[in-house]
């Protein structure tokens, strides 16, 4: 499959599935947690508190891995594996871009000083379980 086709299929997964697993590294060990992701093309964003362990982990080691897309409806569900680097941002513009009403349970609003955004820049993305086809990799 051509890279443009792989990219289109990856963007379809990113558009349709929002909940995934973010893995960080601390002391050479992976730590994983479910997160809600938003994307702008292939760049991913997720909201979190500046006071979480994942923020501390990313500040020490920016390498992250994300699984996104498998929704458990069957063995044919496509999903993506994303390897990349993350950056913690408190940019007011980015916080407003990511803000939504679901975040009210954790934050007072986009101006809340504990509200930050993790911005993930992928280095490779693998399209997995695409109708039984072998994995396809998009290298960035």
Image (cartoon, rainbow, N blue to C red):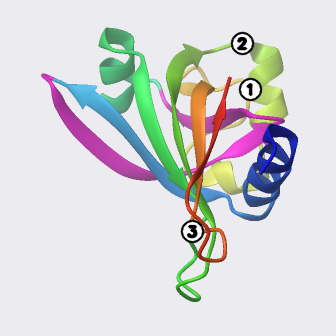
Query: Where is residue 90 drawn, in percent x and y?
Result: 63, 15
Query: Where is residue 74 drawn, in percent x and y?
Result: 56, 88
Query: Where is residue 91 drawn, in percent x and y?
Result: 72, 12
Cβ atoms at labels 2 and 1 below 8 Å apart: yes
Q: Which residue is mark 1?
A: 95
For the residue pair 134 and 123, the one nearer the viewer reads as 134
Query: Where is residue 24 drawn, in percent x and y?
Result: 34, 32
Number of other residues with Cα within 10 Å of mark 1, as a class: few under 14, some 14 to 19, many 20 or more: many
* Magenta residues (range): 27-49
Q: Quadrant of the C terminus?
A: top right
Q: Which residue is mark 3?
A: 129
User: Which numbered disc covers residue 91?
Assistant: 2
For the residue pair 80 and 61, the one nearer the viewer reads as 80
Residue beneath the point at 12% across and 22% down? 27
Number of other residues with Cα within 10 Å of mark 2, as a class: few under 14, some 14 to 19, many 20 or more: few
User: Which numbered disc covers residue 113?
Assistant: none
For the residues carrying marks 3 and 1, which lies nearer the camera in this image? 3
Horizontal placement of 6 versus 120: left or right? right
Question: Is residue 101 something that shows in the picture?
Answer: yes
Q: Marks 2 and 3, Cα distance to the nearest angstrom?
A: 36 Å
For the residue pair 34 and 114, the one nearer the viewer reads as 34
């Amino acid at each position: 499959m051509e890279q443009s086709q792989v990219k289109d299929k990856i963007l379809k997964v990113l558009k349709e599935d929002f909940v995934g697993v973010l893995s960080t590294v601390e002391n050479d060990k992976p730590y994983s947690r479910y997160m809600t992701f938003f994307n702008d093309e292939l760049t991913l964003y997720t909201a979190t508190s500046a006071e979480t362990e994942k923020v501390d982990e990313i500040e020490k080691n920016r390498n992250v891995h994300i699984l996104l897309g498998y929704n458990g409806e069957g063995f044919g569900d496509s999903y993506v594996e994303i390897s990349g680097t993350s950056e913690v941002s408190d940019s007011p513009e980015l916080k407003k871009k990511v803000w939504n009403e679901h975040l009210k349970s954790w934050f007072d609003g986009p101006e809340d000083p504990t509200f930050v955004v993790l911005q993930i820049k992928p280095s490779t993305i693998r399209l997995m379980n695409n109708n039984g086809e072998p994995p396809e990799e998009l290298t960035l």
